Image (cartoon, grey):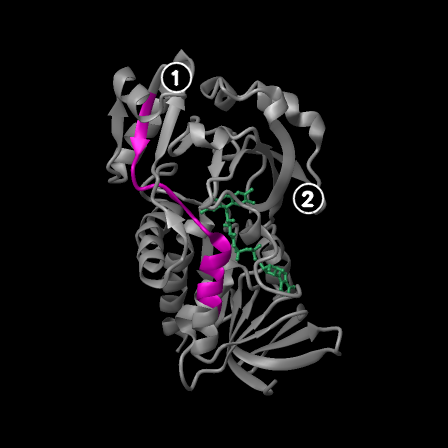
């Protein structure tokens, strides 16, 4: 490890890797420090793998802008580089009058964001999804599914190909501002290291508020405090995965999109995620919540699902900037120059649709780095 590097990225999740692939190039020393044994073991490996369309938030949200751009970029990458994906589309369904009203609001928000949505008649709904029940529905044709592991592997290979170094089992434990950059202290089983980096990019996901704090930012004043939302999934067995042709979603809930159909590129069917806030990392799925799944709008929309088809499966924990009852926050992607930290770029609260947005986030951050250069 050299004493001085150009760019250090903390975290090898999909966001850190996408940025590394974008900024690595000849004559630039780029390092990615990851505390785990390999890449993508946290949020990026434990999500719904949905390529979102950009429907949920207003036009002025960075989340919307980067999701719309990321949606296009992901399909382009998948087509050009053999990353498994399925542009299967998504049907949003309402199962009662209240949801039908909310569905209209969601449809309007999506069309305001420029999405090619299509409201469906009952006949069209039955033709597209004969096994789905609902009183109103619309189609989002630009939604899809991506193999998140393959996407990360693509970013990793591209970053390495352009000369970036990914150092695993390397936990960042200290950051100090020094002349010309930041001194980064790393704890590793083989012994710790200290080096200086000109640019430091915080992509530490669930721990990105702690990294900001390490660099001297008061996270309460900055509103960078993260809360952890745990989303649990149930697998649906019994060959029922063949009874639907696309993603099926309810109208969104205050925290998250609501329990929905998750399909991976091999058409494995799951329901989830059911979200609640947690204080510690524990991915065990609590089977006592099965009744919530069985009473969900999604199970009402998919009457072919029997209680015995549902088995507790995986969970994922998301880095969120808001608590229950609080309004949804936008992504924070910020060059902290005005806090006296030139060359320090924070990415905090990169929750959903962070997977979809990852290639667009990488472009955005690359422009911020050009400001430093
Ligand atoms: C249940 C769930 C469902 C979701 N569904 C979708 C979806 O369908 N579509 C979508 O677009 N998005 C979805 N998301 C959001 C998406 O998964 C995240 O936005 C994305 O994975 C964030 O990537 P990341 O690289 O920022 O974070 P992570 O993947 O969490 O990566 C952060 C990395 O930083 C490392 N790190 C942390 N601290 C340190 C340290 N001190 N030193 C070194 N390394 C450190 C961690 O080990 C980790 O590898 C979902 C998220 C969850 C949890």
Q: Is residue 86 left or right of residue 308?
A: left
Residue 74 vs 110, above or below: the answer is below
Provide the secondary structure element on which disc 1 rests: loop
Residue at 50% across / 51% down in the picture?
350
Q: Is residue 3 left or right of residue 201?
A: right
Q: Quadrant of residue 142?
A: top left
> Visible in this render: residue 268?
yes
Q: Indicate yes or no: mark 1 CB to ligand 1 under 8 Å.
A: no
- Is residue 154 found inside the magenta-colored segment of the image? yes
Q: Position of residue 24 (x, y in %)?
A: 43, 76
The 10 Å Cα crowd at callout 2, few under 14, some 14 to 19, many 20 or more, is some
Q: Position of residue 335 (x, y in %)?
A: 45, 64
Label 2: which residue?
Answer: 283
In the orientation shown, which residue stands out farthest toward the top? 97
Provide the secondary structure element on which disc 2 rests: loop
Residue 162 vs 315, above or below: the answer is below
Seen from the viewer's position, the closer of residues 176 and 49 is 49
Instruction: Point out the stretch of residues depicted in magenta.
Output: 137-156
Label 1: which residue?
Answer: 134
In the orientation shown, which residue stands out farthest toward the front? 239
């Amino acid at each position: 490890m050299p004493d001085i590097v150009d760019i250090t990225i903390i975290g090898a999740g999909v966001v850190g890797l996408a940025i590394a692939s974008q900024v690595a190039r000849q004559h630039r020393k780029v390092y990615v420090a990851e505390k785990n044994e390999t890449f993508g073991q946290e949020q990026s490996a434990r999500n719904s793998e949905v390529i979102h369309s950009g429907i949920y938030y207003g036009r002025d949200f960075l989340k919307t802008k980067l999701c719309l751009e990321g949606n296009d970029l992901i399909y382009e990458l998948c087509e050009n580089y053999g990353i498994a994906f399925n542009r299967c589309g998504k049907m949003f369904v309402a199962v009662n009058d209240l949801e039908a009203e909310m569905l209209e609001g969601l449809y309007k928000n999506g069309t305001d964001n420029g999405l090619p949505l299509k409201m469906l008649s009952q006949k069209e709904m039955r033709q597209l999804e004969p096994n789905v029940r609902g009183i109103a529905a619309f189609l989002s044709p630009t939604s899809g599914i991506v193999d998140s592991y393959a996407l990360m592997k693509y970013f990793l290979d591209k970053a390495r190909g352009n000369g970036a170094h990914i150092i695993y089992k390397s936990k960042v434990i200290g950051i100090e501002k020094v002349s010309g950059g930041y001194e980064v202290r790393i704890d590793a089983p083989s012994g710790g290291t200290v080096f200086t980096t000109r640019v430091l990019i915080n992509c530490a996901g669930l721990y990105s508020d702690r990294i900001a704090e390490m660099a001297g930012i008061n996270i309460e004043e900055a509103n960078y405090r993260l809360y952890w939302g745990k989303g649990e999934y149930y697998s649906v067995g019994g060959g029922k995965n063949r009874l639907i042709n696309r993603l099926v979603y309810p109208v969104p809930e205050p925290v998250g999109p609501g329990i929905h159909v998750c399909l991976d590129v091999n058409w494995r069917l799951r329901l989830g995620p059911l979200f609640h806030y947690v204080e510690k990392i524990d991915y065990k799925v609590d089977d006592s919540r099965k009744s919530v799944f069985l009473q969900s709008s999604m199970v009402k929309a998919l009457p072919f699902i029997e209680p015995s088809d549902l088995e507790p499966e995986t969970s994922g924990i998301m880095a969120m900037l808001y608590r229950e009852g609080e309004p949804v926050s936008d992504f924070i992607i910020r060059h902290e120059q005005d806090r006296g930290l030139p060359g320090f770029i924070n990415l905090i609260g990169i929750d959903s649709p962070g997977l979809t947005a990852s290639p667009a986030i990488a472009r955005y951050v690359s422009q911020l780095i050009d400001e430093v250069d």
